[in-house]
Image (cartoon, rainbow, N blue to C red):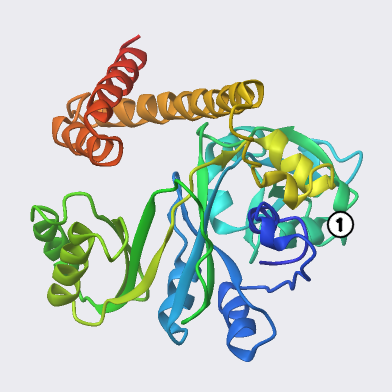
Amino acid sequence: MGPEGTFTEQALRSLPEAGGSSLLAAATAAQALAHVWRGAAEAAMLPVHNTVAGPVPDTLRALVESPAPVVVREVVLDVEFALLVRPGTPLSRVRTVSGHPHAGTQVRRWLSSHVPHARWIAAPSNAEGARRVKDGECDAAVAGLFAAARYGLEAAGTGIQDSSGAATRFLLCAHRGAARIPVPGCAHRTSLIGRFPSRSDQLTVHLQKLKKHPFLQEVSLNVVHDGPDSRLLLADCPGRMDRPETARAVGLLQLSLPGLRSLGSYASAHHVMSPSERSRIMTGKATAEADVSVEPAPGDVTRLREKIDALDQSLIGALQQRLTASKEIQRLRMGDGGARIDSGREHAIRDRYTQTLGDGGGAVADAVLEMCRGQASR
């Protein structure tokens, strides 16, 4: 996605199978998938959703228009932005800022406060925005800090995103029949994509009714505009198609929405990489092989404890991000006059923990939910 230095490149490099592979750049999601169909690439990594900016329309459009793509793997990265400029450029001289539209959505308040007179110029990728700054076409770019060194730029501001804890979800897509990438002990997801005519909000109303169905209460439905008379829908169902609950949900969706086609079942992301981890990947200080855990030998208590310590640290980091996200959601709900707690959603979350972890999962869910409520109320 764009020249070197994008979050999509980071997502791709985080996978073990990327080590030693030739990486082929593409300006758009459609071009990336076209490389796959022509046989120039085995798979394409595409950004599909951001927790702040929502679905990525270009990716959804490319998935709908491409011949039967399937998802073989998912990656989630937490996202932090910097304002990159040519060395010595003060903020007072920034008149144009470039970057991907999703990045612009996530830094709008910061830009309005720090460079209020700057004009936003959309780019196919944040790295393309950085290239434009390097070549003198723009004054500044919104991109990852890691892109600065690649384009001879410096940061006029770091951590400029308006909301902390934002994360972007990426899908590794291939042609139908491609092998899935096994991720032991990982949860799974089944996704569907479709385009539907819509002259008003009838699709939204229909989806709201569907969400009340007991088979679909845990299904995520994301709709984006695709012109004045068309909508794109991405549906994510928990579990694989060999799980009865998932098969029922998929069947009901396809029955209710003819034209909704499956992107397959795949391992869902179990780890959100930190900025320091991403930096090691992009600077070559960590190899793809380092991301593959080595199972300790039976009876090796020390190594097992080290593995548990590492897992605990990952859990703590994930819980910290959950606290931040919960606090922001509850602030927005209360600002709109709603209740701080959504009991229906909490019930669904508890059921998810119980289904995945057994009876003890309910207690874990109760502890997590209680912790997040307490954080939000302080």
Q: Is residue 152 above or below residue 272?
A: below
Question: Which quarter of the picture shows residue 44?
Answer: bottom right
Considering every residue shown, the one lying at the far front of the view is 299
Residue 3 versus residue 286: which sits nearer the camera?
286
Q: Residue furthest bottom?
A: 38
Q: Is residue 139 visible?
A: yes
**Residue 101 drawn at (x, y percent):** 55, 57
Q: Is residue 94 visible?
A: no
Q: Badge 1, how many Cα within 10 Å: few under 14, some, many 20+?
A: many
The residue sitting at the top extreme is: 378
Who is closer to the viewer here, 225 or 95? 225
Quadrant location of the N terminus in the rendered image: bottom right
- Across and down, in percent, residue 9 comes to 69, 58
**Quarter assignment of residue 32:** bottom right
Type of residue at label 1?
A: Lys
Q: How many marks?
A: 1
Q: Nearer the viewer, residue 4 or 202?
A: 4
Q: Is residue 74 left or right of residue 333?
A: right
- Residue at (78, 48) in percent of width and height: 287
Identify the residue shown where x is 68% and y is 62%: 17
Q: Tell me the quadrant of the picture where the C terminus can be found.
A: top left
Q: Is residue 9 left or right of residue 133?
A: left
Pinpoint residue 78: horizontal percent, then vertical percent. Answer: 57, 41
Q: Residue 317, how many percent across, how many down?
A: 53, 26
Name which residue lies at 38% across and 70% down: 264
> What element does badge 1 sit on?
helix
- In this rendering, the answer to whether 341 lies above or below 246 is above
Toward which corner of the image does residue 355 lie, by quadrant? top left
In the shown orientation, is residue 355 left or right of residue 72? left
**Nearest to the observer: residue 22 or residue 372:** 22
Residue at which label 1 appears: 134
Looking at the image, residue 202 sits to the left or right of residue 226; the answer is left
